[in-house]
Image (cartoon, helix red, strand yellow):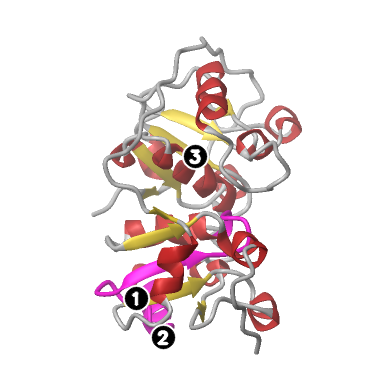
Amino acid sequence: MSDIVVPASWVVDRLGDVQIVDVRDAWEFDGIGHLPGAINVPFDSFRAADGDDGMLPGADSFADLLGEAGLSVSDDIVAYDDHHGVFAARFLVTAELYGHSVERLHLLDGDFSAWQRDHETTSEATAVEPTTYEISSPEDTPLVDADPVSAAIDDPGAVIVDTREDWEFDEGHIPGAVPLDWRELVDDETRGLKSRDAIRSILSSAGVSPDKRVVLYCNTARRISHTYVVLRHLGYENLAFYEGSLTEWEAEGRPVNSA
């Protein structure tokens, strides 16, 4: 069974052995509390600083950020937020794209609110000893630019997946894309993932099957991060992560369809 998306009990059993990263704002981390031993790496700190919200921050900036947070490439990391995991997933995908071993990256199933119902939280500051975080280029990367996405439009062996809300899809989407709002995979009550069977049924209805190359996009690569992590958790291997997403696609003047 995959340990990419892990339940609270998994984390409880490993407190002290894993690095827990809280990507909420600092005021939430300090004022509302956090998981014991968690380190705060706010979402805004690992977005690009050049105005392209949600885009990769740059290797040097990310290395400095994680080093200041006391993280190293050998750490097993569990990330969480308070938005069903979508911001935490973005952190994990960013780490993966900069070479952190995917086997060491985990998403908490549920979020802070879900954890808080049954488990201890604290407002005590976590001691951090800065490190030198080493960025590397992974041997294999899911990262693609617009050209492979364009090639996938007429490829029967590929499916382009738009993870935004339905109204956004209707206003404009990449030709041939299928709509799959990332939130469809989340249970509002538990704040974690729906059951594997339920998710597989949703994916099947959208035509997203493991035998196809799945090309993911949204607007600025945040929402696809969650879907990407979930698909990896389910064993999907042939995944393409279009970092530029619709923001880049439209900026390049590529075709957009509307409902």
Q: What SS does tag 1 mark?
A: strand
Callout 3: few (<14), some (14-19), or many (20+) C-alpha neighbours within 10 Å? many
Q: Which residue: 29% across, 74% down?
A: 212
Between the C-alphas of marks 1 and 2, the distance is 15 Å
Eyeballing the image, is 55 above or below 218?
above
Q: Nearer the viewer, mark 3 or mark 1?
A: 1
Q: Earlier in the sequence, mark 3 or mark 2?
A: 3
Q: What SS does tag 2 mark?
A: helix
Q: Which residue: 41% across, 86% down?
A: 205
Q: What SS does tag 3 mark?
A: strand
User: The magenta stretch spans which residues?
Assistant: 198-223
Residue 72 seen in the figure: yes
Q: Quadrant of the N terminus?
A: bottom left
- Relative side of 93 to 13, left or right: right
Q: Which residue: 57% across, 67% down?
A: 183
Three-letter amino acid code at the position of disc 1 = Ala
Q: Position of residue 16 (x, y in %)?
A: 40, 22
Q: Which residue is labeled 1 in the image? A: 158
Between the C-alphas of marks 3 and 2, the distance is 30 Å
Residue 37 seen in the figure: no
Residue 10 is labelled as none
- Relative side of 201 to 161, left or right: left
Between the C-alphas of marks 3 and 1, the distance is 30 Å
Q: Which residue is labeled 2 in the image? A: 205
